[in-house]
Image (cartoon, rainbow, N blue to C red):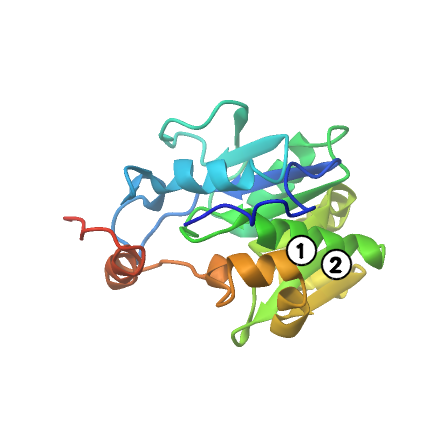
Amino acid sequence: MSGPPAGARAQGVIPGLGAVVLCGGKSTRMGRPKAWLPFGGEALLSRVVARIAEAASPLVVVAAPDQEVPPLPPGARIVRDAVSGRGPLQGILAGLSALEGQAAAAFVSSTDAPFLHPELIRRLEALRAEGDHDVAVPRAQGHYHPLAAVYRTSVRAVVQDLLDSDLRRPFFVFERTRARFAEEADLLAGEALRAADPRLWSLRNINTPDEYQEALRDAGLPPSGP
């Protein structure tokens, strides 16, 4: 996957934007830890972190309490979920809390996004900032994508309230904040993202062995064994 178009104004790390990568899920459908899946000569988590680091810093990886994590690019910091088994909102809370005082907003990602392009991050932050929203979340390909979205770090207070009420769906965050829902047309109105990722494969996740093998094929890589 190529980098941003040469000369694009959006290149580089966005001031004030950090990042959170969640890797503490159980990977039940995959049958093995997704963070360690080989993809283009590197572990999938390492690949995703490196791509995000092109657009956002500081970056924290949220792992389960005893989870082994593959080697990460320089500058990435590992934080641990305080509580296991409470879903992505718990990880988002841990990540946003770790960035307190270091970033005004953060791009939140899952581990299983092998085609994630930095231009998606830049486009989402631009959409969030232009309306002074708390969140910018893609609504594309028939789905919301809360783990490919930008959140103000102050949203952690809303996330904490939701978890305290045992409300664990990320969509509840959008109901309680000023959320910008970015449709496909909104995303692709950004020239740099349209040039880099016209099919919005940045939003593509891999959850099963078949989806993993398909992603390898689409990336022009050989299949991987079990």
> Which kind of residue does numbered mark 2 sit on?
Leu
**148 in relation to 64, above or below:** below
The residue that label 2 is drawn on is 127
Of helix, strand and loop, which one carries label 2? Answer: helix
Q: Position of residue 24 (x, y in %)?
A: 44, 42
> Which kind of residue does numbered mark 1 sit on?
Arg
Q: Are marks 1 and 2 in contact (CB under 8 Å)?
A: yes
- In this orientation, which residue lies closer to the viewer: 144 or 175? 144
**75 in relation to 120, above or below:** above
Quarter of the rendering containing residue 135: bottom right
Q: Position of residue 125 (x, y in %)?
A: 71, 51
Q: Is residue 80 left or right of residue 206?
A: right
Badge 2, how many Cα within 10 Å: few under 14, some, many 20+? many
Q: Residue at x 73, y 31 (%)?
A: 100
Q: Position of residue 121 (x, y in %)?
A: 62, 50
The residue that label 1 is drawn on is 123
Furthest-front residue in this view: 7
